[in-house]
Image (cartoon, rainbow, N blue to C red):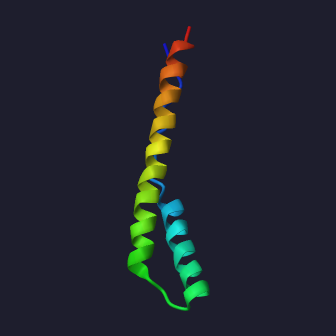
């Protein structure tokens, strides 16, 4: 019997917002203007990829963790 609680995989909102703000800041510093559409087009797939990696890592832990139970 496994008494360990499984933590749900959370969506990386803070990380996605950080990527978005970072891209806006980079555009502002290098070009002197803000391109929100470009920042969204880059930040959204990066956030989804980040979520996919979190989910994949959690799924891998579930497979190896259940084999170690007594």
33 over 23 or under it: above or below: below
Residue 22: image location, x then y, percent: 57, 73
45 over 2 or under it: above or below: below
* Viewer-side residue, 69 vs 56: 56
Outermost front residue: 31
Q: Quadrant of the C terminus?
A: top right
Residue drawn 57% across the image and 13% down it: 68
* Viewer-side residue, 33 vs 55: 33
Outermost right residue: 29
Residue drawn 53% across the image and 28% down it: 61
Q: Which quadrant of the figure has residue 25?
A: bottom right
* Viewer-side residue, 34 vs 60: 34
Residue 45: image location, x then y, percent: 41, 59
Residue 15: image location, x then y, percent: 53, 60
Residue 9: image location, x then y, percent: 45, 43
58 over 28 or under it: above or below: above
52 over 2 or under it: above or below: below
Residue drawn 53% across the image and 20% down it: 64
Outermost bottom residue: 32
The mark total stands at 0
């Amino acid at each position: 019997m496994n008494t360990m609680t499984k933590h749900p995989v959370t969506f990386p909102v803070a990380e996605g917002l950080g990527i978005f703000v970072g891209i806006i800041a980079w555009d502002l510093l290098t070009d002197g203007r803000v391109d929100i559409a470009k920042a969204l087009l880059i930040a959204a797939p990066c956030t989804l990829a980040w979520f996919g990696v979190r989910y994949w890592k959690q799924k891998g832990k579930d497979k190896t963790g259940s084999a170690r139970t007594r």
